Image: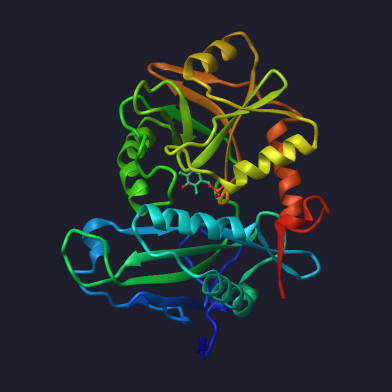
């Protein structure tokens, strides 16, 4: 692998106390290209603009997918990724669905590990601080023929982050007109276009005073799927409930970690369909205790109210909530504070 380092780091100009998500990038990036049926070993170089043809297929047909993962720094200055093998597997699963060639495991991990090590000063200690890592691949072949490309570009860029929504609780709108994903579609893949398609309905929800959308199934708009780009959990009575993954629900790594963690701590978890009707009924009878979203960016995000048609339903705030318990347990693993689930920690040496 070729490595070309910056002459001078930009880190001194960055205010790490005041980071807005995804705006600042570290000194370096990783890039590998696919041509003639194979990926190049790739190179690390200074973070900079790239040049692509105006006819690059991604610009016309949206053939692109991405991942989102984090690197954490422990109090002992060690660097840990959280279950990166899962991101790698999902990266290729997404690629297959978009007819993008799979990336080799050693190229993905060599690039990832070297890049994070080189830019390790950008990973700050303390709960909530992390380096957000964005691997992505797009069709870079110059051609507007409407078919899959023969040339692709794979890159990894990194952005220092504080937790996405801070300590906020959000209010969400139950969406009954637009859909994020449908049966047989690309909802289970981290396809760039899934996000583009969500922006307009999300903008309408923001205009109505919500921060996110609860997506429902595209047939009946009753079965609950996800909230924005988070998986969703409900605490009803003393049970933790989440929808099963499907081709319209993304298989979140935070989601599956929360399920395992909850079970490990003797919380009853049910993976089953859950509908808006049920949520409203349980709310009205006082059994709906918590709703929270899960995802790499937010880890766990409590939802304080949801809007359905003309009605706003507000949850009572819970003192010892399951969401804050699980968030703490997960954080303790991510920052290597606890020794639970050692096999989820991927140390960078
Ligand atoms: C990335 C993503 C998630 C969260 O997945 P994690 O692996 O937990 O970060 C949930 N839903 C959608 C639609 C996503 O794109």
User: Where 31 sits versus 136, above or below?
Assistant: below
Q: Quadrant of the C terminus?
A: bottom right
Residue at image coords 47%, 31%: 225
- Given residues 271 and 122, the one toward you in this image is 271
Left or right? Give the position of 44 relative to 121.
left
Residue at image coords 24%, 62%: 59
Residue 227 percent across, percent down from the top left: 48, 35
User: Where 133 sits versus 273, above or below?
Assistant: below
Q: Quadrant of residue 261?
A: top right
Residue 106 percent across, percent down from the top left: 56, 73
- Given residues 73 and 151, the one toward you in this image is 151
Left or right? Give the position of 331 relative to 105.
right
Q: Quadrant of residue 179?
A: top left
Residue 308 percent across, percent down from the top left: 42, 20
User: Where 164 sits versus 275, above or below?
Assistant: below
Residue ranking furthest to the left: 145
Residue ranking furthest to the top: 285
* Residue 237 at least partly seen: yes
- Given residues 119 and 21, the one toward you in this image is 119
Residue ranking furthest to the front: 37
Residue at image coords 60%, 80%: 118
Residue at image coords 72%, 47%: 330
* Residue 21 at least partly seen: no
């Amino acid at each position: 692998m070729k490595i070309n380092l910056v002459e001078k780091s930009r880190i001194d100009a960055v205010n790490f106390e005041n980071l807005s998500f995804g705006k600042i990038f570290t000194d370096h990036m990783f890039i590998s290209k696919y041509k003639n049926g194979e990926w190049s070993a790739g190179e690390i170089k200074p973070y900079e603009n790239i040049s692509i043809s105006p006819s690059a297929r991604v610009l016309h047909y949206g053939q692109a997918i991405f991942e989102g993962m984090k690197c954490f720094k422990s109090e002992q200055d060690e660097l840990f990724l959280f279950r990166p093998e899962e991101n790698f597997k999902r990266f290729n699963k997404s690629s297959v669905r978009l007819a993008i060639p799979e990336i080799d495991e050693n190229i993905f991990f060599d690039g990832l590990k070297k890049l994070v090590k080189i830019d390790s000063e950008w990973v700050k200690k303390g709960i909530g601080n992390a380096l957000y890592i964005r691997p992505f691949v797009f069709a870079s072949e110059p051609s507007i023929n409407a078919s899959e490309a023969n040339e692709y570009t794979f890159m990894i860029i990194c952005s220092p982050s504080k937790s996405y929504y801070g300590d906020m609780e959000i209010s969400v709108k139950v969406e009954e007109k637009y859909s994020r994903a449908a049966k047989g579609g690309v909802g289970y893949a981290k396809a760039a276009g899934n996000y583009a398609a969500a922006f307009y309905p999300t903008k309408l929800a923001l205009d109505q005073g919500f921060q996110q959308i609860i997506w429902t199934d595209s047939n009946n708009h009753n079965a609950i799927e996800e909230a924005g780009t988070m998986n969703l959990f409900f605490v009803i009575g003393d049970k933790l409930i989440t929808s099963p993954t499907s081709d319209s629900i993304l298989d979140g790594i935070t989601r599956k970690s929360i399920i395992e963690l909850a079970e490990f701590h003797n919380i009853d978890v049910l993976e089953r369909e859950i509908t808006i009707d049920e949520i409203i009924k349980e709310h009205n009878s006082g059994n709906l205790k918590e709703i929270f979203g899960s995802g790499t960016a937010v880890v766990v995000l409590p939802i304080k109210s949801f809007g359905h048609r003309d009605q706003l339903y507000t949850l009572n705030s819970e003192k010892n909530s399951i969401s804050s318990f699980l968030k703490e347990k997960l954080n303790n693993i991510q920052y290597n504070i606890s020794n639970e689930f050692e096999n989820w920690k991927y140390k960078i040496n």
